[in-house]
């Protein structure tokens, strides 16, 4: 672990200015914000992240969870995962988010992990986390040890010839199905980014994971007001029942009219290089009767472009069954 300078800004503006000193936004960023530290500190110990400045944002007033002026909910960047998961409005109106958060990590980790840190958590690909191996995400141009290596946990959607690392987050799958927006304060002021436009697929630049620039500080995430009668559900399939990342997961947000699906939002975890929204599945579902046949058609559509690697072909059928099961449960719940 290399030595670093530590600073604790007292205002958002100071934090942005400190972050803007970084010469790179992603790979080996030389200035990093630290929130809960549950991703960053691990990666610094592994020498994967080597910032020479760490900017502790925990003193900033960004932990509130409050109603949005026009309806909806604003979740502060520093709101802890446990606080969000147990918030009564989240449990009532955005159950999929509460379920996704509670399926992740452990109670201790969720007490530290923050909303923004979770948005920016990095892949668990073992080759990314081990500097003895080639990894285009960690060191562009070195190659990808995962392609042809141990890739059972890795992505089958949105991959490229340079990277098949999966996005490991549960929270972000739920936020994708909920069509959340992300508020960012940067050197040029504040902007709002729909989560759908936030993450970048690896392509030939897997080190560039999202659209943030140096100095960009996430200040909040906003959930739109729920449509009356909407129901939602998160299902996570994994190797053990707790404290494990998803092999496949599905976040469903549905509005039914009788047995007819009026509106559907479907997002997948564990299978994509980014939190994966399946517009294909949504398109198949909307206007259809909610039943086993339409659910299976939606699942087939969601995985039609899957490109498994040597060890993760099983994820194609697993993800399909995950979608069907999640849709089934979400149409049964009140
Ligand atoms: C053992 C273990 C098991 C886990 N299991 C799961 C799981 O099953 N599911 C799951 O989803 N997650 C899991 N996680 C990941 C965990 O959810 C993340 O580590 C956590 O959400 C990161 O939040 P943090 O606040 O600790 O981030 P930090 O480590 O503080 O930061 C992470 C990154 O975000 C950046 N950052 C933080 N805040 C901001 C901000 N406001 N603006 C801009 N950049 C910011 C940091 O610079 C850093 O690059 C697990 C983690 C561990 C260690």
Image: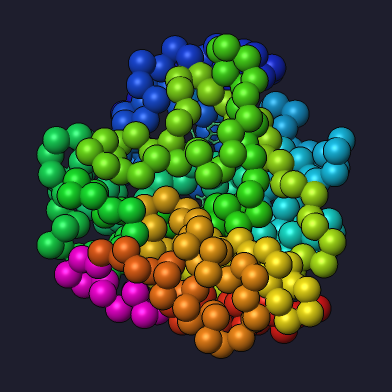
**How many labels, in total?**
0
52 with respect to 115 (left or right): left
- Quadrant of the rendered structure where residue 106 is? bottom right
**Looking at the picture, how far across and down is residue 115, in whole percent?**
62, 45
What residue is drawn where x is 50% and y is 58%? 279
Q: Nearer the viewer, residue 171 or 229?
A: 229
184 with respect to 88 (left or right): left
Check if residue 152 falls in the magenta segment: no
Check if residue 310 falls in the magenta segment: yes
264 with respect to 45 (left or right): right
**Looking at the picture, how far across and down is residue 114, in whole percent?**
62, 45
Residue 59 can be seen, yes or no: yes
**Looking at the picture, how far across and down is residue 88, in whole percent?**
84, 59
Quick one: quadrant of the C terminus? bottom right
Q: Nearer the viewer, residue 93 or 61?
A: 93
- Quadrant of the rendered structure where residue 290 is? bottom right
282 with respect to 148 (left or right): right
Residue at the far front in the pictured view? 287
What residue is drawn where x is 74% and y is 52%? 83
Quick one: quadrant of the N terminus? top left
What residue is drawn where x is 38% and y is 63%? 271
Color theme of the render: rainbow
Q: Nearer the viewer, residue 10 or 221?
A: 221
What residue is drawn where x is 15% and y is 53%? 145
Residue at the far bottom in the pictured view? 292
Range of magenta residues? 308-318
Q: Is residue 299 placed above or below 110 in the rendered structure? A: below
Residue 132 can be seen, yes or no: no
**Looking at the picture, how far across and down is residue 294, in whole percent?**
55, 81
- Quadrant of the rendered structure where residue 59 is? top right
């Amino acid at each position: 672990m290399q030595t670093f300078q530590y600073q604790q800004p007292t205002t958002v503006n100071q934090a942005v200015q400190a972050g803007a000193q970084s010469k790179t936004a992603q790979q080996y960023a030389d200035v990093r914000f630290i929130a809960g530290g549950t991703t960053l500190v691990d990666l610094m110990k592994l020498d994967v992240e080597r910032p020479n400045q760490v900017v502790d944002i925990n003193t900033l007033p960004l932990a509130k969870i409050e109603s949005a002026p026009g309806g909806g909910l604003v979740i502060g960047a520093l709101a802890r995962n446990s606080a969000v998961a147990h918030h009564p409005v989240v449990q009532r109106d955005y159950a999929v988010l509460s379920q996704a958060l509670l399926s992740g990590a452990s109670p201790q980790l969720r007490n530290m992990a923050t909303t923004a840190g979770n948005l920016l958590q990095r892949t668990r690909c073992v080759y990314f986390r081990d500097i003895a191996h080639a990894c285009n995400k960690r060191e562009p141009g070195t190659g990808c040890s995962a392609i042809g290596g141990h890739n059972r946990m890795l992505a089958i959607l949105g991959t490229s010839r340079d990277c098949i690392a999966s996005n490991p987050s549960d929270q972000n799958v739920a936020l994708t199905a909920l069509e959340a927006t992300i508020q960012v304060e940067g050197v040029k002021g504040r902007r709002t980014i729909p989560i759908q436009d936030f993450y970048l697929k690896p392509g030939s630049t897997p080190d560039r994971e999202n659209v943030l620039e140096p100095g960009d500080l996430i200040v909040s995430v906003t959930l739109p007001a729920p449509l009356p009668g909407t129901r939602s559900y998160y299902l996570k399939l994994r190797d053990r029942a707790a404290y494990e990342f998803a092999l496949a997961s599905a976040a469903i947000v549905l509005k039914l009219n009788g047995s007819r699906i009026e509106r559907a939002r479907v997002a997948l975890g564990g299978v994509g290089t980014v939190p994966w929204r399946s517009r294909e599945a949504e398109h198949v579902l909307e206007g259809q009767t909610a039943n086993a046949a339409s659910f299976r058609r939606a699942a087939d559509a969601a995985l039609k472009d899957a490109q498994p690697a040597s060890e993760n072909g099983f994820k194609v059928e697993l993800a399909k069954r995950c979608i069907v099961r999640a849709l089934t449960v979400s149409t049964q719940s009140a």
